[in-house]
Each structure stands twice: as C-alpha cells, then as structure tokens.
Image: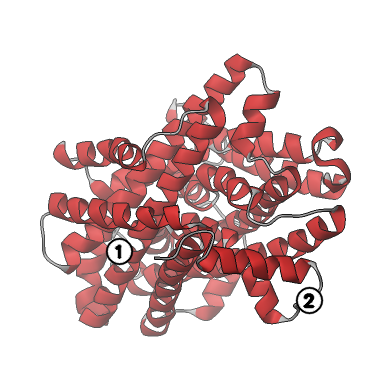
Amino acid sequence: METGATGSTGRTRRGMAEVLAGRRRGPRAALLFAGPAIIASVAYIDPGNYATNIQAGAGYGYTLLWVVLLANLIAMLFQSLSARLGIVTGRNLAELCRDHFPRPVVWIMWAVSEVAAMATDLAEFLGGAIGLALLFNMPLMAGMGVTAVVTYGILMFEARGFRPMELIIGTFVAIISLCYLIEIFIAPVAWGEAGMGMITPSLPDLAALTISVGIIGATVMPHAIYLHSGLTQNRVRMNNDVERRTVLKFSNLEVVLALAAAGLVNMAMVMMAAGAFHSGHSEVAEIETAYHTLTPLLGSAAAAVFLVSLIASGVSSSVVGTMAGQMIMQGFVHIRLPIWFRRAVTMVPAFAVVALGVNATQALVVSQVILSIALPVPMVALIIFVSRKDIMGGFRIGWLTRGAAGLGAGVVLTLNAVLLLQTFGVAIPGLG
C-alpha cells in the first residue's frame, strides 16, 4: 500500500523539488504543482450552484450571467490570495486569525465559520442525495445514506497524503465538466443573448437580487478561502524567496485555469436552464422538477447526464467541505476531531431538513444566502493578512491588488446589506 512518503505524494514532492532546483522543466513540471486549486474549485461547482443557477436560468434566462462572471472573477482573486498566504507564511488563514486577532474576535469568527461550514455541507450532502435518489429511484433518506458512506470512504484516502485526494477530486471535476459540455450541446442555447447577459448588468426585481446573492454565496465560498491556504502551506519545501516566487507562479496559473473551468461550468448550468426552461417553463425552481422536465424536453439521456454531474458534484464537494471544516476547527481552536465524528456532525442539518419535510432545493438556496452573509469574515481577514509586511514580507500585495480585493469584498457586502434591508422590510428605490 502506498503512503504519503513513498507513494504518489512522495513522488510528487520529489518532482517539485527537482523543478525548484532547475532539473525539470516543461508542462509536466507544472502539473506537479497542480492540485490545491482543483480541490478548491469543487466548492464553485457544488450542488448549491445547481440550485441557484437553475433558478437564475429558468426565471431570468441569460440576464444574470453577468453575476456568475463577476462572482468567478472575485473568486479567482481571493483564491489566489489564499494560496499566496499559505505558500509564503506556511500557515493557513484560520491559524493566522487565531494568532493575530483578539480572543473574543477569534471565537466569533470561528462560530460564523462553523455556521458557514454547516450550510456548506447541507448544500453538498443534499445535492448528492437528491441525484442518487432520482437516478436510482430510491428514497431521499436512502440516497443520503449512500452519500454518507461514499464520502467517508473517499476521506480515508487523506491518510495517504495529498496527491491521492487531489487525483480523486480532479477526476470528479473532470466528470462534472464533461457532463456540462454534453448538456450545452443538447440544450437550445441562444449564444447571442448569453453573450449580452455576461456583459450587461441587470437586476430585474427583488427575487433576482436574492438569487444573485445566492449565486455569489454559491460561487465565492468561505470554506474554500480557508481551505486553499491550508492546502498550500506545507505542500512543498521552499528554501528561499526565489523558490517561493516560482511556486507562486505555478499556483496563480492553476487558480486561473481551475476557476475558469469552474466558471464555465456555472455559466453552462445557467445557459442550459435558460435554453430548456425559460420559455414555457420559467416556474422550474427545483432540482427534482428540472430533472423531470428535462426528460420530455431534451430526452432521458440529457436528464441522466444532469443527475450524474449532480452526484459527482455532491460527493466531491461534501468531501472537500469536511476537509475544510476540519481545518477551520483545528486552526481556530486547536481541536482536531476524528474524521468520522466531523462527518457525522456536519450531516445532522441535512438529515434534519429531510426528516422535517423541508423543500430540499429551497434549503439549498437558503444555505447559499447564509454562505454569502458569512463570506466577508474570511475575505476581510485575508485582505488584512496579505497586506501586512510583517506577515508577508516582500510578498505582500500592492495597492492595485488591495484595491481590487477591497472592491470585490465591497460588492459582496453591498449585495448582502441590500438583501438584509429588503428582508426586514426596508424599501430600496428601484427594487420595490
């Protein structure tokens, strides 16, 4: 049996050391550094995205594609900054928060992050269970049981080092991407309208605002920002700043490519829903309804491909969400729970939702809004740390990057504030 020292992880580490020493070059050298952003990208194509993207496409056609594009650009920036933090400092974001912020602030941040982790796992776990239940015609509770067993089995590979998990998650990402490549050629997409939707900002009404906040919550994920810094912090040994710059170059390239692929999948989800449902079926707002409506509209093959992608998304993102939850707890409060216990605790809200008869897709959308409201916590903390010379040294970000990061955080905070004001009955001109 391979281990982290002698198996694929050990070979990867030796290969990266050869690259940094100048003894290996070329595209295959770059592949050795790929992995962290691919794992993080799963958070951007999880079942929460399915719920919000189906509602966006069915209800508003291609109008909200610009929100998906904006969210993806913000995600690229913050994931690259998170990776940068881990590479340069050898610490993850949660650990740095614990070390540098006052204790009451740390406890509040941890509590908010745990709520976000619970909301994340609700979306991911439910998504996989819904897909299994529909594809194999089993009760939703049975689908949840299968999802629990499969995700726990995959999490066992974490003991073998980082590389096996990166390869497993990478395979799931490839399956999801292939499924939506197929869907985009089956659905009748109006490419001109889609192009205009990407570059023309518009929020037709309050429901569109709610979905937009959900899209951002489903795309820019709090746990992914924490996780990425942890995935990069001890992945490769670097002896000097020259080697750190080399690793950063590979990391930034991977972030752009991995998140661009995730962004294209999200856009494909919206375009599929717009092409299939917007004209004549704009009321489609649930994953189950989307599946049953796809069958007569585009055929059973298209519906089956949709469910396969949903299952792959639910299983892989649930694994990644558990990894992130473990890292958040260990970083903030120095507690490392057994992986089976962590997996069990984060499943409780999902089982409760099903047991109480709550609409599963609506629970997914609400969970994404919760995530969007929790998102400023890691975003602001990350900006603070990567801007500090005493933490980053010569690798602290410049004024232009700080401005872009501040603008991205401002967009999220503004959308959240508008949503909360509307929720509490405060009228906002133009959105009444």
Quadrant (top left/top right/bottom left/bottom right) for the N terminus: bottom left
Which element carries disc 2, helix, strand or loop?
A: loop
Query: In the displayed structure, would residue 276 be above or below residue 127?
Result: below
Residue at 80% from the left image edge and 36% from the top image edge? 391
Judge by depth and name the residue closer to the eye, 432 or 152. Answer: 152
Circle 2 sits on which residue? 23
The numbered mark at residue 40 is none
Which element carries disc 1, helix, strand or loop?
A: helix
Residue at 47% from the left image edge and 50% from the top image edge? 218
Q: Residue furthest top?
A: 104
Q: Do labels 2 and 1 touch, CB within 8 Å?
A: no
What is the x, y in percent for residue 307? 27, 68
Type of the residue with mark 1: Ile
Q: How is the image coloured?
A: secondary structure
Instruction: Give me the C-alpha separation between circle 2 and circle 1.
Output: 41 Å
Judge by depth and name the residue closer to the eye, 301 or 290. Answer: 301
Q: Earlier in the sequence, mark 2 or mark 1?
A: 2
Circle 1 sits on which residue? 311
Type of the residue with mark 2: Arg
Horizontal side of residue 218 vs 75, given as left or right: left
